[in-house]
Amino acid sequence: MSVKEEALSLNPLDKIQLIDELLLSLDTPNKELDEIWVEESERRIEAYEIGKTKASDVHTVLAKYNR
């Protein structure tokens, strides 16, 4: 029996637990990437605070992509 067949034969609760474990295994910490995002976040906050950029509410943003 293949891994796929075994997974598909599991009961729903066991499938959920397997999916959760598989997804967690893909989320490996990356210190370098985390540092890049911290810097980017700080740049965006600063740009907002000094008026270089403005905030948009979620409805405006979603409307842009739901055209």
Image (cartoon, rainbow, N blue to C red):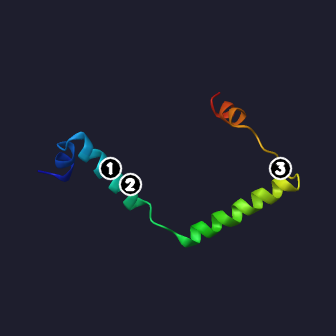
Q: Please identify the quarter of the rendering in which residue 59 is found.
A: top right
Amino acid type assigned to the residue bearing label 2 in the image: Leu
**Quarter of the image where one finds residue 25:** bottom left
- How far apart, in angstroms, are the residues tagged by discs 1 and 2? 6 Å
Question: As drawn, is 49 to the left or to the right of 62?
Answer: right
Q: In this figure, which residue is indicated by the disc labeled 3?
A: 53
Q: Quadrant of residue 43?
A: bottom right
- Asked if the residue at tag 1 contacts the one at tag 3, i.e. Cβ–Cβ closer than 8 Å, the answer is no
For the residues marked 3 and 1, what is the alpha-carbon distance in whole angstroms?
Answer: 40 Å
Is residue 17 found left or right of 7 in the rendered image? Answer: right
Res. 19 mark: 1
Element assignment for label 1: helix
Dot 3 crowding, Cα within 10 Å, few <14, some 14–19, many 20+: few
Residue situated furthest left in the rendering = 1
Residue 43 as seen in the image, left or right of residue 30: right
Q: Secondary structure at mark 2?
A: helix
| Label 1 environment density (alpha carbons within 10 Å; few <14, some 14–19, many ≥20) | few
